[in-house]
Image (tube, rainbow, N blue to C red):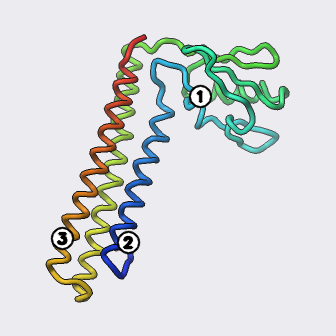
Amino acid sequence: MTHIHSESIDEIMLEAELRMDKAVSDLGREMATIRTGRASVNLLDLIKVNYYGTLTPLNQMATLATPEPGTITIQPWDAGQIRAIEKAIHASDLGINPTNNGKLIRLSIPPLTEERRKRLVKQLHDIVEQHRVAVRNVRREANEAVKILEKSKTISEDDSQKSHQDVQKLTDAMIKTINAAGAKKEKEILEIG
């Protein structure tokens, strides 16, 4: 059963492109949370803090900054939340111990070990592959939608063949974008210093 329902080839192509674009942007968000050798506030994107009983994204309750390449600072808007923020950081899989002076939390980002770099690259490869699969699933659904139009005699066999080729070209372009983004991120992870 296809999830792309359309009355025309143009609608199928548009929906396929939108869904493939979404997979590519989702990849960008997920890759931003993978640590490289440099400090980045994006490392904290997935951290949620128990803020008066509500899990709240850290970036919605504090100012995050990278004053130095190896340091992230977190300045809570409500200083009473410092302990809750520290607890959330400890509970995350970042493996970084926060320090605070009562008003500001500092995270010193240690250099990555070779073993940690290899684990991060493996994690990156898994994420990239998941997004390639997502794009291929959209291709399959678009092709099924085109076949439905052909079977119902809404489009000709020639239009169907051309549509399949267009869907494949779109898929190839998206996979190329995903691979390039993954290779760039891998280079950042393996970069020392």
Q: Are marks 3 and 2 in contact (CB under 8 Å)?
A: no
Q: CA distance from mark 3 to mark 2?
A: 18 Å
Labels 3, 2: front one: 3
Q: Amino acid at mark 1?
A: Val
Q: Is residue 88 left or right of residue 178?
A: right
Closer to the camera, 119 or 164? 164
Mark 3 or mark 2: whose residue is earlier in sequence: 2
| Picture coordinates of residue 75, whole percent (x, y) | 75, 25
SS assignment at label 3:
helix
Q: Which mark is residue 162?
A: 3
Disc 1 from disc 2: Cα separation: 37 Å
Q: Quadrant of residue 149?
A: bottom left
Q: Residue at x 68, y 35 (%)?
A: 58
Q: Point out which mark residue 41 bears.
A: 1
| Relative image position of residue 11 (x, y in whole percent) | 37, 73
Q: Residues within 10 Å of mark 3 (few under 14, many from 20)?
A: few
